[in-house]
Amino acid sequence: MKKYIFTAGILSSLLTLLIFSSCSDILDVNAYSKITNEGIEDSDKGADMWVMGAYNGLSRMYVYDEFPRSIELDNDYVTGPSWAFGELGAGNFQGATNQSDAVWKLSYDLINRTNEAIYHIEKMGNVTEAARNNCLGELYFLQAYGYFLLVRAYGEVPIFEMSINQGNDPNQPRQPIPVVYAHIIDLLKNAKEMIYKNTSSSYKEGRVSAGAAASLLAKVYATIASAAMPSGTVYVKGGVPFSMNGSVKVFTQPQTLTIEKQQVAGYETFDYLAYYTLARDIAKDIVVSKLYGDHELIPYSILWKKAGRTSKEHFFALQTKSGDDYYGALFSRAYVGQIVNGYVPNGGGLSHGLRDHWYKLFENQDLRITEGVMHRFVRQSDISWNGGGYYPNTDEWKLKARGLDPANNKVADPVAPFNDGRDYRSGTGEQYLAYTTKYTDVTDRSLTRTDAMMPLLRYADVVLIYAEASNEVDGLNNDALNALNAVRTRSNATPRWFGSSEDGGIESKEAFRSAVLEERAMEFALESDRRWDLIRWGIYLGVMNGIGTVDEINTIKMREAKHLLYPIPQDEMLTNQAITENNPGWK
Amino acid sequence: MSKTLNFNQKCSGYLERCTCINFLKKITVMVLVFLGSFTFIQARGISGTELINNQTIPITGKVTDVNNEPMIGVTVIVKNTNTGTVTDMNGNFSLNVTSSDDVISISYLGYKTEEFPVNNSRTFSITLQEDEKLLEEVVVIGYGSMKKRDLSGSVAQVKADEILSGNPAASINQALQGRVAGAMVNQNDGAPGAGISMQIRGTNSFSSNSQPLYIVDGIPFEVPTTPRSAENTDGSLEASANALSFINPHDIASIEVLKDASATAIYGSRGANGVVLITTKSGEKGKPRIEFTSNVSSSTIRKQVPVLDGYHYALYRNEQQDNALLYDSSPFTQYVYPSPGTWRFDTSNGEVLSAKYNPSPEDFLSPGWREGIDENGGTWKQWVEGTNWQDQIFQTGYSQEYNMLISSATDRGNYTFSGNYTSQDGIIKGTGFERYTLRSNTSQNISKNITVGLNLSYTNSTTDFAKGNSLDYSILRSALLYPSTIYYGDFSQSDELLWLSANPRTYVISTKNELSSVNIFASAFASIRLNDNLVFRQNLGLSNFENQRSTYSNRDTGEGAIDKVNGKGGLSDNRQSHTVTESMLTYNRIFGKIHNLNAVAAVTYEHRVNSAESMTATQFPTDLTENYDMGLALVPGSLVSSKFESKLFSMLGRVNYVLNDKYIFTASFRRDGSSKFSSENRYANFASGALAWRLSEEAFIKNLNLFDNLKLRLSYGQTGNQAIPDYQTMYTMRVANYPLGGSEHSGFVSDHAFNTSLKWETTDQYNAGIDFGFYNNRLGFVIDYYYKKTNDLLQNVKTPQSTGYISQIINSGYVTNEGLELTANLVPVQNKLFNWRIDANLSFNRNRIGGLLADQFSSRLWYKADNVFIQRNGLPIGAIYGYVEDGFYDNEAEVRADPTYASANANVVKSMIGEIKYKEGLHVIGDTNPDYIFGVTNNFEWNKFNFGFFVQGVMGNDIFNGNLMNVTLFNTTNIPVAVYDYRWTPETKDIAKWPKATNQAKRTWLISDRYVEDGSYIRLKNINIGYTFDNPKFLKGIRSINLNASAGNLFTLTDYSWYDPDVNAFGNDPARRGVDVYSYPTSKTFSFGLKVQF
């Protein structure tokens, strides 16, 4: 018996001894499929990976269609069926699916990614100086882009100097608008000097260049300036969209509305002229002096083609990958439709378009409608009757598409592309809008997710900012006019000129600013820009309510003061202890 | 940070080349080899001594019970030797003893053991007395077993045979529903093989797992999560499988539920949610026991949710249009269902290409062909008939089960072999569960002092899920929402309604969502009796799980729509390997007759490795090969794989001391280390203590002659919870690439808001209990009161979205649970002919949150259902938060009276008529915790008949009926009849419960008390009747045949409006209990069973 006890004693002490002496960290585990922050190498390549992770925040914005929906649907010229526009597009910002929340959530996601990346890159010791500057500059730019979206949408917003993973308090209060702008301007001032110009051999297409940072800064200055301007007049084309002739809708011509601008709340302390001067100067450095790289207005023929996707015009754009579940673009389906076997299948999109009034802003020969608008489209529902749709619903196009004169007599054969034996129809319903062609040049249009590119900032924008700022600071002048006309003539539009308004000329500073604003609406249609122009100019309510209650296809355009700012998401209100009140009018 | 990564750190000294991971495995093997050789020597020694004894005295005898019936299989052994036998069919035995001084010992389970000296007798006639003292029953407790009378903690024991007889259940936890006071068992839904959640004494925590720890034959049984179907990329809900379905319920001998901390503290870091000990059958001495059981059953839907038929649906759609014109200023064009019906002809160049009949509502009252003549005189025909889609997806499911068990034991050891085949068809077409299990439990006494054994089980199961528990595409959603005006044979409109759902019939026929699982669970032990008091035992448990979920949605479904997706396939696998080693010393001794000491000390180590991978693909050239060849797909989806590991190292000890058979003291201690925490917070200690006083042994109680048993129990202990995901204390990254010019560039982003200071969640539990037994224990009560406080809650707290993170796991706040449990058993009638036994239990639990810095919310239920469950100090876990409704705006004046609309546009005001009025602000609108739960079992035996029924109930809980969130009254979806009858119209405004119908999607639905329903129910869970033939004359060689018939879920009393109140879509998530969202309905079953013993 003693033998057993002895043996057991030896056994247990052996066990104990081995367990406790040999392996002090018996509980350490392998992270296997998890990458830890230390796994990212301290090198130019490692720094780049952090930056790519931040850029990925842009992919996240667009992956589930939350963008551009959340920043595009609420303006005067866009429209679509009620299932798509019944919420945010109808002014219901706190609707069932909280479509506006994406701006908050995903902008802050982007900001947090940049903060994490900045923190880690700053700790790295083996990164070459140029690469390090470029990486940090890009991160500053992306962060500024996020805050710029936020401050325009929500007004006062929290600022995160660092991520909560670096010990920051998760409950951050809202900061006054000037404080937010000071942060944005600070970031961009650094970024424009740190990021590679697109002329540098180290610059890579698809990433932002110094020109983008400088241009965003110009746009920020112009935004502050126009919002801070205490009063002024803006002319906008719009008004009541249709009249009823019995049960037939008759579309109207856009009327010129004269709108007295409001100063945007929170911008009172800015000297608007000083900011327009800043905007003009930096825009001039980019456009005239070419201090920030090689940028130009590229020909319209390649502007929306894959060949045109370079930093010359598109210096900041969402990069996508054809067919990819995550990196493939979903927005293109709503805007230009998926095309399978020559038609748009049910559920295949082609739903979001521009209103008839927008189409009527253009001259007939303007490439932005001759090429830029889809005149022929076939949907699956047209297949059974061998039909198709055409736009616009005018006598001119009726003749082209159907060979019919205004009295519906057959006078000719349909012309290409309508001469394929299909029976083309048009109408006043939600199936017949001005659909853009901007996003059609993709690798495979039959896919749900394409490699369409979403422009986030392009050279034409800073050219028009230059025109706008120059006019505000110096009054009517040729530099401004030339800038405006550079954008117009690129698309085959007639140049504007100074002269009496009765002859069609521009006779005042107000008329010029309105012309620039209108040009922006035409040029940047469905590039998520229009709402923010209306807001920064303080004319949003005037323009929207000028339409009346609804547009041609019953999308509600009526708005109230509460619509000037988005509601802060309920989630934030419930979780952030430092924010107690939502924007006016929102729960 | 780097410290947590040095898994490959070399051990010092002579073991230099081994990694720490391999190290303990080696130790265990060493120990086993050592014991093996030791044993061998011992065994040889014993056989040597036996040879010397050649002198024998034959004796014979007969054993009968008090009724003079012969007793079969009674063990007769010669005391202190290895010689023994069992009685035969007639109760006779014969045996050789070596000397007249020998003593024979006669024992039989449930009877008092008798001993007789041989002396000069050569024949014996023995009558065994039943052991009246039920208290002598042995219960299994952690790391040992104990006489029930010596228990100081709160432990409930359930004999598997008792709850399974006449109550076929595919898993043991399912059968436990309503059987144990303090244990709340919920099915996730009614699908065959569906998940079951069990909560013991309330919810301790809101984000970590609140399931009890399951221990099978001493080894923790942890099941990996069901792999998600690969197409489920957004992490939404889906059907999961029941962990314990891997164990054949017929293999189970008993289940012990450890409830108070005195019992659970020995499981330290994982004991906080209670512990369920499952002991599988081992052979019993006697003739080999051969048992065959079989069961066939049919199940049908318990209740349909009536939705509008074709006629009413058409009327409803037309009313939507009328109201849109009347209230929403929407121009009127044409009725969806014009009266009379109209033909639409599509012509091109004078030729009619196609025709379509728009039926009138009345057309659905008389289904049949409708004829139309086009402008060219051509005749067209179309069949018009409405469809009840629920009829199309539901079926009568047939199930069968076969089970074979062979077991026996001798002095040298015992064995059990069993096999089980179960096949269940669900009540939704295409769903079902199929399982094969094999088990072998063997142990061998290779010497007087050494026993080795191995329990091995293999399970292989296949579950066919219906897509349910989901607010997007799912079969039930489709069956409830799909327009009833579409003829089920007509597929022409399927495509147009794809946004809504696939045709339900197509769905059940064409989608595949299959889970196949394999589990191998082995536990081996060697125990060595070091001396009369001391036993050393080494356990080694190895288990492996393999799961594969295989999904395919073909071209007819929404997910795999033709032209757009062209078939979507997915394959996802996961696996878990789990290694447990335990070295344990047990000391047992009685000193001076009054001191009874039992002590145990052990060291345990566990290592778990999980890995998973999944793939998806779309654009298949054909649906024929489904997802069997993923390579055929033109567009591969993302590839996902992962691997995790975690470790747990513990030391533990327990002392149980009984003084004078009256005073019982228990103390236990465990020190646990877990790899889930950072090195500073890895270890924690858990201790417990308990006192019990057996008053019934005191003279002053004995003299009352009232109590057969009276025991007071008091206990306190600490337990922990570490059930958080792995690596939460590490700064981990996930891939976040970015495509530049169409090609992806590597990128990373921080994957969560991490927390290095995480530590254990600790529960302090106090328990006071009293056990009574009266009238020869024919009436018994067990009453327990407990109070638990769980501190440092590990919780996944929602962070403000502005942080860029969704949530962070932190230790904060506390939860208290306070409750009362009553268990009663009563034998009202007990005689030779008739027996009646009642077992009842009732439990109350009160749960409260405290110590939170601010209100918190559980994760979203699904898209559009955020912040449904609030976590606020003073409220229970499971409080529902939302708006309170205040009737409807019946007219313009009422709308204007609301300040929101006082100055609104006239059109807006008009459109608000018939809409819901919400009261200002958010309120607590429900609580999913029941006030009490209960179960009552009645069993009757009369002659050879047995009859029993079991009633179970849950009272006072709310259910969040998420199904209603798709009842929006503004689109093409069908609605329940109950909604239609109470929709708002000027005529029904006084009784209206739902707003007006309209086709304008302007209405905003808020989370309100509308979705909160009373989930109380009382259910006749099972009723059964059986008859037993003992030693039937008509079949030789059969010991007994039992025939039984039973019905399940025959009758339910509830106000809940949907399929079934026993629903819990979020399974194990304690923060989101009591949610119903297109959950698989519970069925009503009828079964017939057979049990033959040879």
Image (spheres, coloured by chain):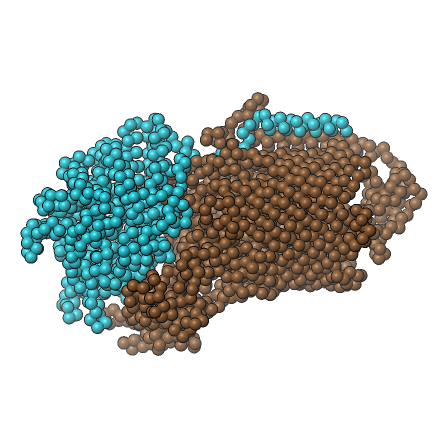
**Residue B949 percent coordinates (x, y):** 67, 62
Residue drawn where x is 29% and y is 51% of the image: A565
Q: Quadrant of the N terminus of chain A?
A: top right
Q: Nearer the viewer, residue B144 or B568?
A: B144
**Residue A315 percent coordinates (x, y):** 23, 41
Q: Nearer the viewer, residue B234 or A344?
A: B234
In the displayed structure image, the side of residue B1031 where residue B654 appears, left or right: left
Q: Nearer the viewer, residue B400 or A121?
A: A121
Residue drawn where x is 50% and y is 39% of the image: B726
Q: Quadrant of residue B487?
A: bottom left
Which residue is outermost to the top?
B13
The answer to whether residue B586 is above or below residue B800 is above
In the displayed structure image, the side of residue B242 where residue B943 appears, left or right: right
Instruction: Identify the chain drawn in cyan.
Output: A
In the displayed structure image, the side of residue B548 where residue B151 appears, left or right: right
**Residue A16 percent coordinates (x, y):** 63, 28
Q: Quadrant of residue A428?
A: bottom left
Q: Nearer the viewer, residue B825 or B284?
A: B825
Q: Can I make out residue B940 in this image?
A: yes
**Residue B723 percent coordinates (x, y):** 53, 42
Residue drawn where x is 43% and y is 76% of the image: B365
Residue drawn where x is 50% and y is 56% of the image: B1075
Q: Can I make out residue A419 in this image?
A: no
The colour chain B appears in is brown
